[in-house]
Image: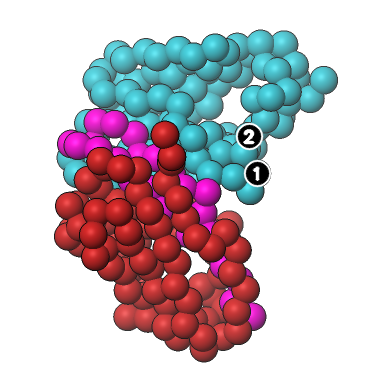
Chain colours: A red, B cyan
């Protein structure tokens, strides 16, 4: 079975540009999570969705960050405008049901803002 | 706010010896997870622990949970090189938000 698919794998862009990260969760999973990983702050949950509805976005750092899930098989995380401090690895994860099952992580997008 | 502390943060292991990683958390939790991450890679689920006294084993790794002490341990038996990775524990408190520890970076040397 295909796992969580993220694109792009790597993104390098200049400060001020819009960045869009994409995620396809595992089919049948009803929860989707966006995380950010940095050396300084470790793994942080940014936002999560249940059945395509955002449930908790308290981890989204600023209004420059937004996330959508238009359908069960696709989600985006957008940063506009991007800043160097946004450089990190962004992971998407999905899970099924009431949370007993582990979250399955994608390979991540390594984002560098110059 | 749920806080998760792992120690040690770095662990140099000698092949063939046994070691333990500790994970403490600050508030009541109903689920604890252990993940493994290889450098530049994704996170791979190792164990899900759901109840006090739960013990799970896979190969050379064994995880246990003491909910009263708010402590989980990951025990490595007879370390081998392919266990070199970063190990994370993660805890959730009655919702779906995972709070991760800082990770323990394990290096196994001959």
- In this picture, residue B44 sits left or right of residue A66: right
Looking at the image, the residue that sits furthest to the right is B110
Quarter assignment of residue A15: bottom right
Instruction: Name the disc covering residue A1, or none.
Output: none
Camera sees residue A57: no
Q: Which residue is mark 2?
A: B85
Tags 2 and 1 on a common chain? yes
Q: What percent of the width, then of the height, locates residue A49?
A: 23, 56
Label 1 Cα crowd, 10 Å radius (few <14 / some 14-19 / many 20+): few
Compared to residue B22, the image places residue B99 above or below, namely: below
Q: Residue at x 55, y 21 (%)?
A: B20
- In this picture, residue A32 sits left or right of residue A43: left
Q: What percent of the width, then of the height, locates residue B36?
A: 53, 34
- In this picture, residue A98 sits left or right of residue B81: left
Name the quarter where the N terminus of chain A is drawn: top left
Q: Residue at x 72, y 11 (%)?
A: B16
The chain to which mark 1 is attached is B
Q: What percent of the width, then of the height, locates residue A47?
A: 30, 60
Q: What percent of the width, then of the height, locates residue B48?
A: 35, 26
Compared to residue A1, the image places residue B98 above or below, namely: below
Compared to residue A44, the image places residue A82 above or below, namely: below
Q: Residue at x 32, y 23 (%)?
A: B49
Q: Residue at x 52, y 81 (%)?
A: A83
- The secondary structure type at the circle numbered 1 is loop
Q: Is residue B24 magenta?
A: no
Of residues B109 and A71, the one nearer the viewer is A71
Camera sees residue A5: yes
Say which label, 2 or 1, has the lower sequence index: 1
Q: Which residue is mark 1?
A: B39
- In this picture, residue B80 sits left or right of residue B48: right
Of residues A14 and B28, the one nearer the viewer is A14
Magenta-colored span = A89-114
């Amino acid at each position: 079975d295909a796992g969580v698919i993220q694109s792009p794998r790597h993104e390098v862009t200049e400060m001020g540009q819009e960045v869009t990260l994409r995620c396809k969760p595992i089919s049948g999973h009803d929860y989707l999570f966006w995380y950010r990983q940095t050396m300084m702050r470790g793994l942080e949950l940014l936002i999560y969705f249940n059945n395509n509805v955002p449930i908790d976005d308290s981890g989204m750092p600023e209004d420059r960050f937004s996330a959508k899930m238009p359908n069960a098989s696709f989600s985006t995380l957008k940063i506009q405008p991007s800043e160097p401090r946004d450089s990190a690895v962004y992971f998407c994860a999905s899970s099924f049901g009431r949370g007993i099952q582990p979250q399955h992580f994608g390979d991540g997008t390594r984002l560098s803002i110059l | 706010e749920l806080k998760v502390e792992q120690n040690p943060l770095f662990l140099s292991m000698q092949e063939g010896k046994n070691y333990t990683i500790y994970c403490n958390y600050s508030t009541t939790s109903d689920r604890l997870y252990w993940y493994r991450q290889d450098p530049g890679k994704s996170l791979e689920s190792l164990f899900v622990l759901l109840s006090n006294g739960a013990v799970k084993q896979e190969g050379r790794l064994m995880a246990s949970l003491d909910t009263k002490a708010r402590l989980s341990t990951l025990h490595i038996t007879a370390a081998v090189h392919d266990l070199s990775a970063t190990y994370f524990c993660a805890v959730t408190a009655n919702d779906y938000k995972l709070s991760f520890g800082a990770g323990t970076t394990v290096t196994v040397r001959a």
